[in-house]
Image (spheres, grey):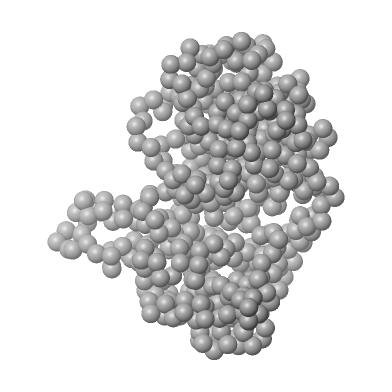
Amino acid sequence: MSTKYIFVTGGVTSSLGKGIISASLAKLLQASGYSVTIQKLDPYINIDPGTLNPYEHGECYVTEDGAETDLDLGHYERFLDKPTSQANNVTTGRIYQAVISKERRGDYLGKTVQVIPHITDEIKRRIKLLGNTRKFDFVITEIGGTVGDIESLPYIESVRQLKWELGKNILVIHLTLVPYLSAPGELKTKPTQHSVKLLLENGVQPDILVLRTEKPLTKEIRKKVANFCNVDINSVIESIDVSTIYEVPLLMQKEKLDTTVLEKFGLQAKEEAKLTSWKNFVNKVKNPKQKIEVALIGKYVELSDAYKSINESFIHAGTANDCKVIVTAIPAEEITDENASVILSKYKGILVAPGFGHRGIEGKISAIQYARENNIPFLGICLGMQCAVIEFARNVLGLKDAHSKEMNRKTPHPVIDIMEDQKSISDKGGTMRLGSYPCKVKKGTKAFEAYQKTNINERHRHRYEFNNSYLKDFEKAGMIATGVNPDSELVEIVEIPNHKWFIGVQFHPEYKSTVITPHPIFVEFIKAAINR
Ligand code: GLN
């Protein structure tokens, strides 16, 4: 079968959940026996979100191949249980960078380089790249932003051109909002009509409309939308607000989004989309047997999207333990040695988040000291692990001014130092140690108990690292390296064996936790927290 391309555009407002709709449709097609991948096109000019502050754009998600990408790719992987790659996230910056370097090379000699056709050609090339691998029956492409945005225009124009080129192998789904006005007590379709008009002005007729709503859509509303927007009534799909994003595939199945899509391509499900384990999971999310509270200590806590994958990993690990994990985000800066016990004593587990820069470091260290001294299950991720090392150096090894070179270049005890191959790098974008690296886990450790194997691979995003010249001292005093990179000897996991459950990981387990495969480190962390 030739690859089918599905585009998901958004209208009326941002944050309608295009990523979740794309991932849900992909899940249903996958459960129907097809291979599917999802791609995100982001209209901003940064080459990737790696250089963006999480306040601007939420979490930066890292793929196996080390691409720093949009957080929607995290949803794609969590839903499909399949890895994505650099090809799954393209920004306007990357498109222009490619076109401009071709221009410098002389590929367009004599020609004026223009948005149409040069930029749109590059966009189309990136879209077809995934299809050309012949690995996927369906490529779902989510277009970031909202129809009508100036910066989205070249993408919509590319979709228009592809509709001509690919004929029956392409389909456009437009996601809009049907607001409910409480005074007249009515759902309003006008914004949807307007946003479809905008798409039409750009030459694109959507094939399916997904309407986000807080109240059920009546038959009349569906008819009205169908009539005004040139789609048949079966192609008007309701997407009603739900308590968990993981319910959306089930709702989309009820609304027959998958069968409508397959019908439009003249296809049938290869197998019945039963979604048994998915339903089981959703059921556990909605009906937990118990609840536990854990603290997430970080720097961007006002913003839930900054730690998206961590929060989702807790949901996965919670259901694996038949429990709901209530995560309280606590700003690191608020914690001190004096108030740590007051703030933290009610939590069954403490997680210190990844991050960059000095802000909140001392609060993280106070929280870790509290967790270590009071036998509270602790998980430190990346910077969180580095802070655990600093805390141990200062308070157990007695190296009072121990620090990371990232925070204090002149520290006499750089227990966290810059990695050798990072020393010569000055560019900020895409230059960290990124993506998947192997790690050897020592037997008879808590890490081994979690993974149940010695050879693992985990994803990284950092410049600094445990300083191996201190390793002997640490191990003598009771913090040991239980996971090490087999090639570079970099320390990837540290633990304190005589603590109930204390693990620091230099990598990011949260990027690899999915609904079907919750991450073992999170699962064991929650198990330890429950048993506390
Ligand atoms: N800032 C630290 C480093 O660069 C940790 C990075 C992280 O937490 N992702 O090594």
Residue that appears at 64% across and 88% down: 220
Judge whether 519 appears above or below 389 on screen.
Answer: below
Residue that appears at 56% across and 72% down: 177
Question: Within the image, what quadrant is residue 354 found in?
Answer: top right
Q: Position of residue 438 (x, y in %)?
A: 57, 33
Is residue 307 in sight in this rendering? yes
Q: Of residues 367 and 107, which is closer to you in this image?
A: 367
Is residue 501 in sight in this rendering? no
Q: Position of residue 84 (x, y in %)?
A: 53, 52
Residue that appears at 40% across and 66% down: 149
Q: Position of residue 501 (x, y in %)?
A: 74, 28
Judge whether 466 appears above or below 277 on screen.
Answer: above
Judge whether 399 appears above or below 199 on screen.
Answer: above
Judge whether 262 appears above or below 84 on screen.
Answer: below
Residue that appears at 72% across and 39% down: 294
Left or right, 475 with reference to 42: right
Question: Within the image, what quadrant is residue 368 found in?
Answer: top right
Which quadrant does the C terminus fall into? top right
Q: Of residues 440 and 119, which is closer to you in this image?
A: 119
| Number of numbered discs visible in the structure rendering | 0
Left or right, 304 with reference to 350: left
Left or right, 144 with reference to 316: left
Q: Position of residue 185 (x, y in %)?
A: 66, 80
